[in-house]
Amino acid sequence: MNMLKPAAFAAATALVRPRAVVSVRADASDPKALIAQLNAAFEEFKKTHETQVSAKVDDVLFNEKLTALNATMSTLEASLDEQAKLIAAARLGGNTPGDMDPTNPEYVADFKAHMRRGDVSAAMSVGTAAEGGYLAPVEWDRTITNKLKQRSPIRENAQVITISGNGFSRVYNDGVIGSGWVGETAARPATSTPGLTSLAFETGELYANPAITQIALDDVAIDLEEWLANEVEGEFAIQENVAFLSGNGTNKPHGILTYVTGAANAAKHPFGAIIGTTVAGAAAVTTDEIVDLVYSIPSERVANAKFYLNRTSLGKVRKLKDGQGNYIWQPTYVAGQPSTLQGYPVVEVPGMPNMTTGLVSILFGDMAASYLVIDRVGIRVLRDPFTNKPFVHFYTTKRVGGGVQNPEYMRFIKQA
């Protein structure tokens, strides 16, 4: 509600007109420029939020501007992350993002060769517009505008191993060993011995079976094989990362959110569930609750900790201040380094739940020590030009598993 008199309200809202929103310039290839824009956007965000708080105004202009600034900062952070990846790839002599397997250029070449001889799925043909005919005209815009697909960064933060068998198991020591003080000549009775428990990690299989006619492959005016290969890779990444968060373990990984206290896999690990706290708010958190979350992890397990939350939750957390009036979220000042919350890196995870009653909205901890991703070989492609003539299918599979390997390195916040 607007709590100001008309004149005061007009003066306050004049400070936050949409024209003041910092926009992202077209050139997003200069890390220094991106950092400068990010910090400028954050300064504008702080000014707007502080004006709103001091004026006690809950007005659409303030809210729209804060939302726009949040989106701008998230876009700038994503651009900085992408530039960091490109720089790292260039230094390592790797391929650019988008290749099917940056570590195996021969695989990419073989896959493209398969496609040129004819074999993918989605049943495309030139004769039907929606199935490929759009791509056949002589003169047209030789690009494809893709629908946004949000990918989760769980895999790149977790520990990833490649196995050669059907599954993987790990042995855990419960650390329960007896000891005691004795006199020089006192008896030394037997003490308790540590117990060992094994935990199995199984794999599930992802598949795609796209198909294209040879005429479509011959006549379309784009690099169709590269486009479709990237589509399959992107779809696999989306599917597996959803499973890394909330998978039920049936032909797929066990998601990390299923291991929190009270969830389906709370008793699965020999070390127990991921512990956390239920905060007072149904749709918000406080600075004190964030601080309590940070200090709930033992000091020896917090060195590589990060925050994991989605963009909507991040927008709310950016407004929080400490006792001295400083914002606890801070933008990055160094290219390749993430923004921080309470001094720890922040990872934006699209699949994380919103701040909604009963849901886990924030994870905090060392993801590499907490979650294990298992790859069985990698992506396989079987070329099938015989089963469904005149289509040639690319039967593409990938076997992936996952689960919590140590719950002691992770904590969570759950909304009331």
Image: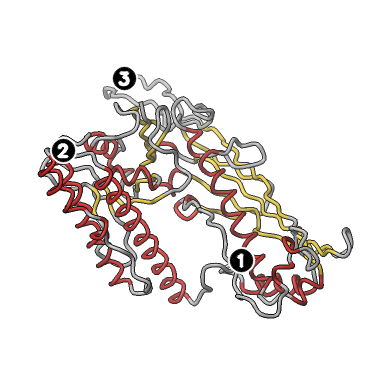
86 or 301, nearer to the observer = 86
- Which of the two discs, 1 and 2, labels the residue nearer the N terminus? 2
Q: Which numbered mark, 1 or 2, is in the foreground of this view? A: 2
Marks 1 & 2, CB-CB < 8 Å contact: no
For the residues labelled 1 and 3, the Cα–Cα distance comes to 68 Å
* Residue, disc 1: 100
Identify the element where label 1 is drawn.
loop
**Residue 131 in the image: above or below residue 401:** below
Number of dots carrying numbers: 3
Tell me the tag on residue 56.
2
- Which of the two discs, 1 and 3, labels the residue nearer the N terminus? 1
The N terminus: image quadrant:
top left
Residue 89 placement (x, y as % from top left): 46, 72
Identify the element where label 3 is drawn.
loop
Mark 2 residue type: Lys
Residue at image location 44% in from the left, 38% down from the top: 353
- Which of the two discs, 2 and 3, labels the residue nearer the N terminus? 2
* Residue, disc 3: 186
Mark 3 residue type: Ala
Residue 281 placement (x, y as % from top left): 30, 28
Marks 2 & 3, CB-CB < 8 Å contact: no
For the view shown, which residue lies furthest in the bottom direction?
A: 138
